[in-house]
Amino acid sequence: MSLGVLLLSQTGASCDDEASAVRLGSAEVGTVDEIVEAPGTVTARTAATLTAPAAGTLRELLAEPGERVAKGDVLAVIDAPELTRRRDAAREALERAPSGGSVPVGGTAEFTAVRKRTDRQAAAAFEQARDAAGQIADPRVRAALLHQVDAAEKQYETASAASAAALRSVQRGVASLGRAMGSLAAAQRMQAEQAYRLADASVDALTLKAPVAGVVQYGGPPPAGGGGSLAGLLESGQIPQTTGTVSSGVDAAVPEGGYVAAGTPVITVVDTGRLGLSAEVDETDVLLVEDGVEAEAELDAAPGARYPATVRAVDLLPTTSARGGVSYRVRLELAEGRYPDSGETAPVPRPGMSAVIRLKVRQAAGAVTVPASAVVAADGRDTVWTVRDGKYAAVPVRLGVQGEDIVQILSGVGAGERVVIAGADQVSAGDEAP
């Protein structure tokens, strides 16, 4: 904000030359920035918390706190004996499954019994796979596994339907039992392969990989509680936290070899590659805020430093502000900060730090300006007291951009006019001005 130099003078209040509270200045040409101030918080680009997919022990921790990791890096491995047993059993069943040819059955009745038994085994395998997927707290991993279960079930239903159709052909005398048995063998083999793949995928999920590049931090926010049933867990997308309390002064992070319940936060990866700001702007000001508006932030943690920022988005839906009013979240890109006095680089902020954000919503360059103190209310109108022909006169004005210290005058007062900048309540129209 650039201001014109104010020409100040002082007028006597009485014969004893006692100084008066009335002060005069001049309307000048300058630049006015209108500022909207809002509380805010430093935000990271993203943060992903990796949770234990199932109950077990933390077998390995492969990253240290503060370490920078790449997307896809293995960070931890969970040992869940139950899931491992399921996979081993599925592998053994796959090894016993027919590898080709046909299933040895005595006739159509035994064929039907074998097919129904295979259908029951498939249904049990899919139920177990869904149960294992439902225990995974990470919604992305859980959704991927459930999608894999659905796809496998549809494939098996197609194979089972083909074996049933083959049996009907045998019963009508248009196909041999050998062909039907080959179809049944294919369905059995598919069921065994799918059961193993699904069990193996659940075990693979026990290896926690970084979903984004960033900095490692142990632990993380626990997931919100969900229902106790599988249906409730799948609907809520969360697993209850059941790790118990941690004594004061003890690191809450799960140690290597420690027990973890399903959904226990193990590691959080914070992407600090591009820091931002989240500001809460009151509804009375938000219509002035647009994409691209420049701003400046001050952090409680770095007194005196200034951090430039730029608005990148304004939310459409409101939130309730801390004062109980309606506000809107404004998201900004945060740039490197500096100390204005020394020019030194300011510290890099951390996500979650508090900030005061000043958004420059409007600017008027080459404008006629007066100090904000010169504008008073008279008869319900904005008014400036001026000196015309040596006497005080109250002049209604129309305001434009309103800064913290100076305001733009659109009409009523011209550049160079003398105006009252303090003590307007002590002058009257027609009084002699010094």
Image: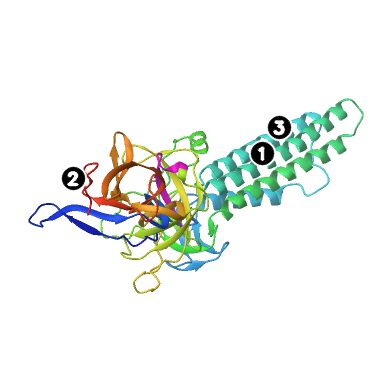
Instruction: Find the distance from the CA under tag 3 to the CA under tag 2.
Output: 101 Å
Residue 160 image position (x, y, % from top left): 75, 35
- Looking at the image, residue 200 sits to the left or right of residue 305; the answer is right
Position of residue 313 in the picture relative to residue 105 (left or right): left
Residue 33 position (above or below residue 285): below
Instruction: Tell me the tag on residue 122.
Output: 1
Residue 342 in picture, x, y percent from top left: 35, 74
Kind of residue at badge 1: Ala
Question: Residue 131 sits in which quadrant?
Answer: top right
Q: Is residue 49 visible?
A: no
Q: Position of residue 355 (x, y in %)?
A: 36, 56
| Label 2 Cα crowd, 10 Å radius (few <14 / some 14-19 / many 20+) | few
Q: Quadrant of the N terminus?
A: bottom left
Magenta-span inclusion, residue 285: yes
Identify which residue, 61 or 377, lies in the foreground: 377
Q: Residues within 10 Å of mark 3 (few under 14, many from 20)?
A: some
Q: Which mark is residue 114?
A: none
- Residues 91 and 242: in front is 242
Magenta highlight range: 276-287
- Tag 3 secondary structure: helix
Picture disc at residue 426 = 2
The residue labelled by disc 3 is 116
| Amino acid found under the numbered disc labelled 2 | Gln
Q: Is residue 94 magenta?
A: no
In front of the other: 111 or 191: 191
Which callout, 1 or 3, points at the residue further toward the start of the chain? 3
Q: Nearer the viewer, residue 125 or 213?
A: 213
Work out how far the residue at label 1 is from the one at label 3, CA to CA, in angstroms.
10 Å
Which secondary structure lies at badge 2?
helix
